Amino acid sequence: MEEINDLVAQRQAKAEELRAEGVNPYTNGFEVTHQNAQIHQAHAADSGADLENCSKEYIIAGRIMARRDFGKAAFIQLQDRTGKIQIYVAKNNIGDASFAVFGKLDVGDIVGVSGKPFRTKTDELSLRAGTLQLLTKSLQPLPEKWHGLTDVETRYRQRYLDLIVNPEVGEVFKKRSRIITLMRDFMQQRDYLEVETPMMQQVAGGATAKPFVTYHNTLKMDLYLRIAPELYLKRLIVGGFERVFEINRNFRNEGISIQHNPEFTMMEFYQAYATYHDLMDLTEEMLGGIAEQVCGSKVISYAGREVDLTAPWQRLTVKEAVVKYGDISMEDVQDHGKALAYARQLGLAFDDNIGYGKLLTELFDEVAEPKLWHPTFVTEYPTDISPLSRRNDENPEVVDRFELFVVGRELANAFSELNDPVDQKGRFMDQLAEKEAGDDEAHAMDEDYVRALEYGLPPTAGEGIGIDRLVMLLTDSASIRDVILFPQLRKEMR
């Protein structure tokens, strides 16, 4: 740390020297004509002889990432948003005054350069600087060249530094942006209307999760950062917007892990006159198509293993998944007592009065979920753990719902919506009883939503897709923090 402080002091001294000489180390604006990648592309096929008579001059700007000095000349590597290019800086080309300023520049400084292209003796395409101007003096040294920025927490906490020194990190976030654009285009091409719904809500609804609570001083009431936009989006279906979607943030006051961040991005969409079966087909088409456009194929690699996103995807009921991947028969998994005994055999501690629906989903989470590597739609979730889903007409103990799993984690959740206001109010009452019994994540009562249903929600299906997890999958990223620019971290200890 003392060495870093010394380097910072040296750079601060250089900045003051420049000011004393009339050079502003923090300028305002600079007109750029080209990016580095454009220069590489324009002259990729040109030989050194071809470039000897090239009169094209480029004006670029970027950060100095390396420099090699040779007395009255130097080479620097200049990095902009498109990559790096080598610059040859010679005293007899830029003049004495500019070269004196250049002598006070460090790796990390941001400069503007004008120059013409040429090739060095090693055949590297470069620019011969005709002018060079300091734009921003960097006071903090970049990480040492050969070791780079490797400490994981520092990378997440100082993402700006991570992006400077680890170019592959920037590529992940460029892919993220493209994935979201492709999702938006897919929905709009199918006549879905993009909407925005409240981020602060009077009732934390749309999912079972523990919310963040805030307080509105003027209204004198608690508000909740939304855990899901679902109930507002379905209100819009009631209002006649038959196809809607929203890409935005949700907030859940829960643990942090490689799969969970308290603030995360979802796309939720709802379609009137559709069922959850329709959404399975749509999801296969959308995610398979995005993978092909972003990764070049529907067969991708994740964590060193192949993942095949080619339709059709595997479809299993919750019970079938437990039987397929666990060590229990279908007859026993349907018996509460035998299923409970099997759970205890697995080391899961439940008391005798655990509901069958919760027991079954806990068994699924333990024995099946981690093994669902290729995309799998899991259906027929128990009604008592699905307070917003439509009961199956043939078996009211389960709902018309699926969750999509890929590489052993949930990626999407969808169902045919419950549009019976009486049934919905009864489900909310059941959830209230669970909340009073100590379940912090049980769904709250939303009287206005019940009232909306009383006006009539057409047959509707809806789905939420976790964008962060989708980006993890399509960029082969191990942690959700690798695909969120500024993930939540513990308070920095100084």
Image: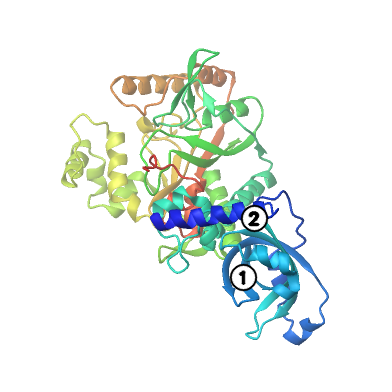
Q: Does residue 74 appear left or right of residue 491 in this picture?
A: right
Q: Which residue is painted at 29% across and 54% down in the image? A: 325
252 or 216, nearer to the observer: 216
Q: Does residue 55 appear left or right of residue 230 in this picture?
A: right
- Amino acid at the residue labelled 1: Ile
Q: Earlier in the sequence, mark 1 or mark 2?
A: 2
Quarter occupied by residue 232: top right
- Residue 172 can be seen in this image: no
Can you give x and y, in whole percent of width and height, for residue 39 in the image?
72, 70
Q: Which residue is painted at 59% across and 53% down in the image? A: 179
Which quadrant does the C terminus fall into?
top left
- Would you call the spot at circle 2 few (<14 residues within 10 Å), some (14-19), or many (20 or more)? some
Colour scheme shown:
rainbow
Check if mark 1's residue and mark 2's residue have beta carbons within 8 Å. no
Quarter occupied by residue 149: bottom left
Q: Which residue, given by chain and number where applicable, does mark 1 sit on?
A: 76
Q: Which residue is painted at 77% across and 56% down in the image? A: 31
Can you give x and y, in whole percent of width and height, for residue 440 in the image?
34, 26
| Furthest-front residue in this view | 20
Residue 18: which disc? 2
376 or 2, nearer to the observer: 2
Can you give x and y, in whole percent of width and height, for residue 468 in the image?
49, 48
Tag 2 secondary structure:
helix
Is residue 416 shown above or below 189?
above
- Amino acid at the residue labelled 2: Leu
Tag 1 secondary structure:
strand
Is residue 424 shown above or below 23?
above
Kindly report the distance in space between the C-alpha atoms of the residues bearing marks 1 and 2: 20 Å
240 or 135, nearer to the observer: 135
Which quadrant does the N terminus fall into?
bottom left
